[in-house]
Image (tube, rainbow, N blue to C red):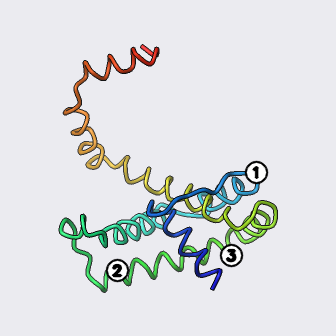
Amino acid sequence: MRYRTLAGAFAACLIGMGPCVATAGPFADDMAKCLVRSTSESDRADLVRWIFAAMTMHPDLASMAKVSAQQREEVTSKATKLFGRLLFESCKSETVEAVRNEGPQTIQYAFEILGQVATRGLMTEPHVGQELQALGKGIDQEKLKQLVALAGKN
């Protein structure tokens, strides 16, 4: 049961639904690098789809995006297979060393890094970038300049 809890905790951390208190040491960093190196763009897209599907379960987002039960099952299945491949095959030795030397919380840290890399790929897509820039148009540029000047970084 302890391992189910650990798996749920790092999954929640990965999708930003839980506190991530894991700290990075050299072994956790090696594991995170392996996770990133061992995933393709397609793997990362599958991961982002799973994160998105999980986030649509939140009541505040449920009305904005509909993910069918079949779609949810498919993306969860792909993510589960991806996590298993990474943990038990591609990055097994890095995972063992990280857990042995820095504790099981290193799994959370390493997958958080993978989630950040996968999400960064999403954010750099041109259509998403345009929408993100729309937010900047509504920010008062003068107030932003004053804030930066107040911080002494003008």
* Contact check, label 2 and label 1, Cβ < 8 Å: no
Dot 2 amino acid type: Arg
In the image, is residue 56 above or below residue 21?
Answer: below
Q: Residue at x 66, y 52 (%)?
A: 23
The N terminus appears in which quarter of the rendering? Answer: bottom right
Mark 2 burial class by Cα count in 10 Å: few <14, some 14-19, many 20+: some
Percent x, y of residue 126: 30, 46
* Residue 72: mark: 2
Residue 97 percent location from the top left of the image: 79, 65
Residue at x-position 48% and y-position 63%: 18
Q: Give the quadrant of the C terminus.
A: top left
Query: In the image, is residue 114 above or below residue 10?
Result: above
Q: Nearer the viewer, mark 3 or mark 1?
A: 1
Q: Amino acid at mark 3?
A: Glu
Q: What residue sits 25% from the left and 42% below the top? A: 130
Q: Residues within 10 Å of mark 1 (few under 14, many from 20)?
A: few
Q: CA distance from mark 3 to mark 1?
A: 20 Å
Dot 3 or dot 1, earlier in sequence? 1
* Above or below, 8 relative to 33: below
SS of the residue under disc 2: helix
Which residue corresponds to mark 1?
26
Secondary structure of the residue carrying tag 1 is helix
Q: Is residue 68 left or right of residue 13?
A: left
Q: CA distance from mark 3 to mark 2?
A: 25 Å
Residue type indicated by callout 1: Pro
User: In x, y percent, where is residue 82?
Assistant: 54, 74
